[in-house]
Image (spheres, rainbow, N blue to C red):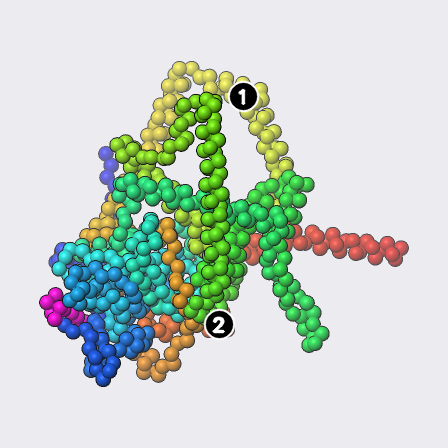
């Protein structure tokens, strides 16, 4: 037998870790869900809460008790405030921040501002016992929660409470999961009120977003008609170099998990990420949800029908800017013109293809990028500012120059609300009309089949056409069907998000690769390739040479055949042993990583989705707004205190790196956690400190551009030059 060993020299981290492990079986780390920031006085016991007065009238004004507690620096002034004063205080900048996470692509500054219209999940509402709300936040490998606001259906989270978090980004597709819960300290579960998935992919950095979302029990299944109140958050992104973010999407993201040592916190994390419905659990209701979602994808027919009619009738209009000279003053103006660009492109490409069939592969690859560009244009040209996505142009210039072309701009509350409603109503009417026509057609078909039955022209077995699709719960293959449906639905969700530019970084790469293949295939002699491929296939596999193959290779004696079988069997066994070994190593690595995470962070583990796999997309409500971020001017003393980490707590995330004894990935702390940019960026000074992948991208771009110029433009210029020279010589002669 053999013994395989993995050996390396122990590092200081290994020695320190083993010393701690031998002394204590519990790994002590900071708990982001606990009171790392200053603790505020809360409601206390249930009897004390019932006896507490939360509202009073003073000098003709109704004032409310500020919860979870007053400002420690202004206890008297902030203990009782009016509704207007509470709303005003809630919008002020947060005093303390919790810096948490493991990513290095950027930072997400998020503040939980308020909730409105929450349902009461506590008994005894007539005695003032209402929902005790808190908000949980899950982002990649970190989890945090706010203070609890007792007995309030519209809680406001004060800037001196625990409500502000700095989250570190590992992947651009990661969503921010926000859940609102009713705190039940005397039970094993905190009740989920509602949750929301905040998409950060298409948000612009250096913008302060104040976004309001409706709360739903789940984003993976129906019903979505019933709302459970709303939550308002304030959010800002600080991203690294745009090219770095774009290149990070070339690799598929690793799975991310969050652990907790507290089962109650684990349930909060799980419901925040996945909602109250477990779609992996076997049940007929879950199967019906998957089938219903597959039927919903049939609505794409309406988009295809409208797009096809608009294409062939030259209805679609695209805005193109053309230079027009101006005499007063002497300059060039770029005037917009509306042209049916997509119809024109389709006509030119198809007319060339019918004349030259060699262009079929080129048109095929180009059409993929064209479809992605069309869906991007549909989103960027729409009236809804919260439905827009980052454009192909932005990503292209990010890849070339490092920075995109999107500039921060304000978004007013209810911006273009009338146009948005008109567009939504028109689409709803379009779908209803199509469904009505489908129902009328179905009735006509049913009457037709009834007439055929009366005539006796059809077989009785065709009666199954009239029956609806039903599922028999007694069959043993239902659960595998549910699992396969889940895989299919998740694949369709990811594909849909790429096509409609929800995953805009991946959409750009698919479009860019399609256009690259289109350009490459343009210079390939496809007719020659097909002809010689068919020739080689015929002459090699159907020619008389196959007889020699039969004599010297296929027709072998029994001894050679037995030896050949033994050799093939030995090769298969070696290959199988290698595959078993690799699978065993992978299982052992995963088991060891899971054990390390459970030892270091807690035994309860939740998987956090990186790619967007929810059925429904949570979109900010129209009353949401955004303003360009303007850092507050501070004194040198204030800046020094911020850089020293004043009013902040740093907690490393749960991302482990390394082999044998992994260690926590240490992200750099935030120098200015109260809103000042973490680094000074001078737009006039270029950054030459590129990584290897960035340098490869730059050099590759230059090589591809030079190749296209050499192959396409240079011959045309030479032929034009020869024509001019020959013309001049002819005239002189």
Q: Earlier in the sequence, mark 2 or mark 1?
A: 1
In the image, taking residue 607 as reference, residue 308 lies left or right, namely right
Residue 344, percent across and down? 64, 51
Q: In the picture shown, does residue 701 fall above or below 560?
A: below
Q: SS at mark 1? A: helix
Quarter that holds the N terminus: top left
Q: From what the image shows, is residue 396 above or below residue 439?
A: below
Mark 2 or mark 1, which is nearer to you? 2
Residue at (62, 33) in percent of width and height: 531
Is 49 a magenta residue?
yes
In this view of the protein, can residue 298 be seen by the observer? yes
For the residue pair 120 and 300, the one nearer the viewer reads as 120
Q: Which residues are magenta?
A: 39-51
**Would residue 424 be found to the left or right of residue 468 on screen?**
right
Q: Quadrant of residue 289?
A: top left
Task: Categorize mark 1 by other alpha carbons within 10 Å: few (<14), some (14-19), many (20+).
Answer: few
| Residue at screen point 29% across, 33% down | 472
Q: Nearer the viewer, residue 242 or 18?
A: 242
Picture quadrant of residue 295: top left
> Which one is in front, 730 or 464?
464
The residue indicated by pointer 1 is 546
Q: Residues within 10 Å of mark 2 (few under 14, many from 20)?
A: few
Look at the image and say whether residue 369 sits in the magenta stretch: no
| Quarter occupied by the C terminus | bottom right
Tag 2 residue: 683
Q: CA distance from mark 2 to mark 1?
A: 68 Å
Residue under the point 59% across and 54% down = 316
Residue 438: percent from left, percent from top: 47, 41
């Amino acid at each position: 037998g053999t013994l395989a060993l993995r050996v390396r020299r122990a590092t200081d981290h290994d020695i320190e870790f083993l010393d701690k492990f031998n002394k204590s079986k519990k790994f002590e780390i900071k708990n982001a869900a606990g009171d790392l920031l200053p603790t505020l006085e809360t409601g206390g016991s249930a009897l004390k809460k019932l006896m507490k007065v939360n509202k009073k009238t003073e000098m003709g004004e109704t004032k409310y008790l500020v919860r979870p507690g007053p400002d420690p620096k202004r206890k008297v002034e902030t203990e009782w405030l009016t509704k207007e004063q509470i709303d005003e205080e809630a919008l002020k900048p947060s005093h303390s921040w919790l810096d948490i996470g493991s990513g290095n692509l950027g930072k997400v500054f998020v503040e939980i501002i308020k909730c409105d219209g929450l349902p009461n999940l506590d008994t005894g509402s007539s005695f003032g016992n209402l929902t005790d709300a808190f908000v949980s936040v899950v982002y990649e490998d970190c989890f945090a929660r706010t203070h609890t606001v007792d007995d309030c259906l519209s809680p406001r989270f004060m800037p001196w409470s625990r409500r502000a978090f700095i989250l570190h980004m590992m992947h651009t597709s990661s969503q921010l999961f926000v859940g609102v819960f009713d705190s039940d300290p005397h039970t094993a579960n905190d009740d989920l009120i509602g949750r929301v998935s905040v998409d950060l992919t298409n948000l612009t950095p250096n913008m302060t977003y104040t976004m309001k979302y409706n709360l739903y029990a789940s984003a993976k299944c129906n019903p979505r008609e019933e709302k459970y109140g709303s939550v308002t958050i304030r959010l800002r992104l600080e991203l690294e170099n745009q090219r770095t973010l774009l290149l990070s999407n070339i690799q598929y993201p690793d799975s991310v998990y969050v652990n907790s040592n507290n089962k109650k916190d684990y349930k909060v994390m799980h419901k925040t990420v996945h909602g109250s419905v477990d779609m992996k659990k076997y049940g007929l209701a879950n199967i019906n949800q998957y089938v219903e979602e597959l039927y919903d994808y049939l609505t794409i027919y309406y988009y295809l029908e409208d797009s096809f009619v608009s294409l062939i009738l030259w209805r679609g209009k695209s805005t193109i800017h053309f230079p027009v000279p101006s005499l007063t003053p002497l300059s060039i103006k770029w005037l917009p013109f509306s042209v049916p660009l997509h119809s024109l492109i389709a006509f030119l490409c198809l007319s060339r293809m019918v004349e030259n069939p060699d262009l079929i592969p080129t048109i095929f690859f180009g059409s993929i990028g064209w479809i992605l560009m069309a869906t991007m244009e549909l989103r960027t040209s729409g009236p809804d500012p919260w439905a827009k996505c980052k454009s192909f142009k932005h990503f292209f210039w990010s890849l070339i120059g490092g920075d995109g072309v999107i500039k921060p701009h304000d978004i007013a509350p209810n911006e273009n609300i009338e146009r948005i409603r008109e567009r939504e109503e028109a689409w709803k009417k379009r779908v209803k009309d199509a469904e009505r026509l489908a129902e009328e057609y179905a009735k006509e078909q049913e009457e037709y089949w009834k007439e055929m039955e009366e005539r006796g022209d059809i077989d009785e077995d065709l009666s199954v056409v009239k029956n609806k699709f039903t599922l028999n719960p007694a069959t043993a293959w239902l659960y595998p069907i549910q699992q396969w449906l889940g895989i299919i639905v998740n694949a369709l969700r990811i594909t849909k998000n790429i096509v409609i530019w929800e995953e805009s970084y991946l959409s750009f790469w698919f479009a860019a690769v399609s256009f690259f293949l289109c350009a490459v295939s343009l210079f390939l002699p496809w007719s020659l390739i097909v002809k010689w491929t068919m020739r080689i296939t015929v002459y090699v596999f159907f020619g008389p040479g196959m007889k020699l193959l039969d004599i010297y290779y296929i027709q072998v004696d029994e001894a050679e055949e037995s030896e050949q079988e033994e050799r093939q069997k030995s090769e298969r066994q070696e290959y199988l042993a290698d595959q078993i070994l690799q699978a065993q190593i992978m299982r052992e690595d995963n088991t060891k990583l899971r054990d390390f995470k459970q030892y270091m962070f807690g035994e309860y583990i939740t998987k956090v989705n990186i790619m967007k796999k929810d059925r429904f997309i949570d979109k900010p409500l129209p009353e949401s707004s955004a303003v360009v971020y303007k850092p507050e001017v501070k004194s040198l003393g204030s800046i020094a205190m911020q850089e020293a980490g004043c009013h902040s707590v740093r907690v490393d995330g749960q991302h482990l790196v390394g082999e044998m004894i992994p260690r926590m990935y240490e992200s750099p702390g935030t120098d200015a956690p109260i809103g000042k940019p973490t680094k000074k960026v001078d737009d006039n000074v270029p950054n030459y400190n590129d990584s290897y992948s960035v340098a490869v991208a730059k050099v590759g771009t230059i090589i591809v551009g030079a190749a296209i110029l050499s192959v396409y433009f240079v011959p045309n210029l030479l032929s034009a030059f020869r024509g001019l020279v020959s013309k001049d010589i002819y005239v002189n002669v």
